[in-house]
Image: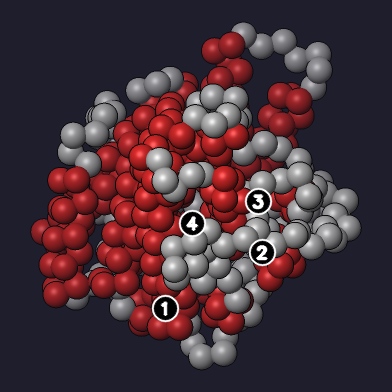
Amino acid sequence: MLAFDVAQYVTATRAVGRHYLDPELRGRMAELYVDLHAVLSAPDTVLGRGERRVLRLAELVLQNEWKLAVPSGAATPAPASLGMPSGPRGKRYQAYANVRLLNHVLGTRRRSSDASIEHRGRQTLRFLVRSWLKYEQCSAGGTETWGWQRPPTATEMEERLGRLSALSLETAAWPGMPRPGESPPARWEEYAGSPGRSDILQYLVNLPQTEQHEENAFLRVIHLTEVTTSVILARVLGAKTWLEAGRLPQAGGCLERAAELARMQLDVMRVLRRTMSVENFLSYRKETGDASAVQMTSSQALHIHLLGVHPRKVEALGGAAENAFLLLYLNDQFQPLRSLLHSVPCDTEEGAAVLRAAHALDETLYAWRRLHLGLAHRYLPKDSEGSGGTSGAPYLTGFYHDRLFDHEGQPFPHATPISAPPLGEWVRARSVFSPLN
Ligand code: HEM
């Protein structure tokens, strides 16, 4: 395990695209994952804190290759040649986008506070925006060494550079991170410490399936959206807790911060919409398989904490084992932000500030959902299903307009939840973030 050459893995993946990674290398990583998982979960394993930290990080990377080692599909048996256990490996989105590694950098896996998640989230966003800008600048200048197939046109590139420069300027005063190494470190321990977070972001998070430039950009949009969503979710959870305690100024502050990050999320999606051609998008879509952000736990959780479980999403949530636990929110006790807003007084300055911030958040997230629905219409062939197995654009049309406030600015009444369907066998119940900040 410790002799595994991480740098070689990164270089090999960048050279051909992850979809075309040597099956022997992937098979070896998948086997290492199975062994490591067994060791880490055995009750009699004795490890120092440092060792455990290194091995936990390695587990996150190896698990992704273990998931990708079988063809698309959650319950596909492992090829006999790999000599690994068969069974469900979960959906592919998390592995495709290396989401668990990103969450490791953000600290969401350690039940961090909302303030800590926001701090790390801003560090990460600043880093990722700069890294993307530099990648595009080098690509435009002809010095970039990977992801050079089917680049954007000169006009698209010019627009992209302008938009990314604006985002970089916006994040310039945010907290920074150490510079990553000039090349990927070879050993796990070099990624495990605090400075190693930059190397994780630079080398381990963005591993496209193909060598196509635009898939590389697409993944960067996904990562920026994941991070902004985690921060928004953390702050919405904070706001709910403060509202339940009757602390309006603190709740308003959390919602203002959430709204600020939502504006950035919208700007990030505009980079994709304005600068990626339909042809380029379609040319790498096949290799991403059935990885779909409908499996994006943070976004699904965010919308549930804002609005409750939408009846039209029940099937999609139940269909992804990673997200099925969210159906547990279909109960009378659960109060999304939408219900809590009903008791906020609009005739006090503090109450009005909460409602203003909630409006701003609602408006921006709604604009994002409209833009995203537009993407489904523009980029996907007519009447085609989504890669996540939903009906595609019609699925998104079913709920994109569900909001906190109606068009007169009044909070929508929260509908009585429908009863939860029976949950499948493989449901992982887990808290997303601790509300005990
Ligand atoms: C051209 C680009 C895109 C297209 C055509 C597209 C299309 C779709 C479609 C059809 C769905 C429905 C689920 C399914 O796959 O069956 C979906 C869901 C979703 N997509 Fe995208 N998408 C695009 C880019 C993105 C990006 C960059 C993100 C950022 C993470 C994203 C986030 C989401 C989310 C969060 C959902 C779940 C919606 C929900 O259930 O509330 N999409 N997308």
Label 3 and label 4: CA atoms lie apart by 13 Å
> What residue sits right under mark 2 in the picture?
310
Label 2 and label 4: CA atoms lie apart by 35 Å
Is there a contact, CB below 8 Å, between mark 3 and mark 4? no
Label 1 and label 4: CA atoms lie apart by 29 Å
Q: Secondary structure at mark 4?
A: helix
- Tell me which numbered mark, 3 or 4, is placed earlier along the sequence: 4
Of residues 291 and 140, the one drawn nearer to the viewer in this rendering:
291
x and y percentages locating residue 104 in the rendered image: 51, 33
Is there a contact, CB below 8 Å, between mark 3 and mark 1? no
Q: Secondary structure at mark 2?
A: loop
x and y percentages locating residue 56 in the rendered image: 60, 27
Q: Is residue 50 above or below residue 300?
A: above
Give the crowd class for mark 1: few <14, some 14-19, many >=20 residues within 10 Å. some
x and y percentages locating residue 7 in the rendered image: 41, 37
Label 3 and label 1: CA atoms lie apart by 31 Å
- Tell me which numbered mark, 3 or 2, is placed earlier along the sequence: 3
- Tell me which numbered mark, 2 or 4, is placed earlier along the sequence: 4
Q: Quadrant of the C terminus?
A: top right
> What residue sits right under mark 4 in the picture?
18
Is there a contact, CB below 8 Å, between mark 3 and mark 2? no
> What residue sits right under mark 3 in the picture?
67
Q: Which mark is residue 302?
A: none
Ligand 1 contact, mark 4 (Cβ < 8 Å): no
Judged by depth in the image, the label closer to the viewer, 3 or 4, is 3
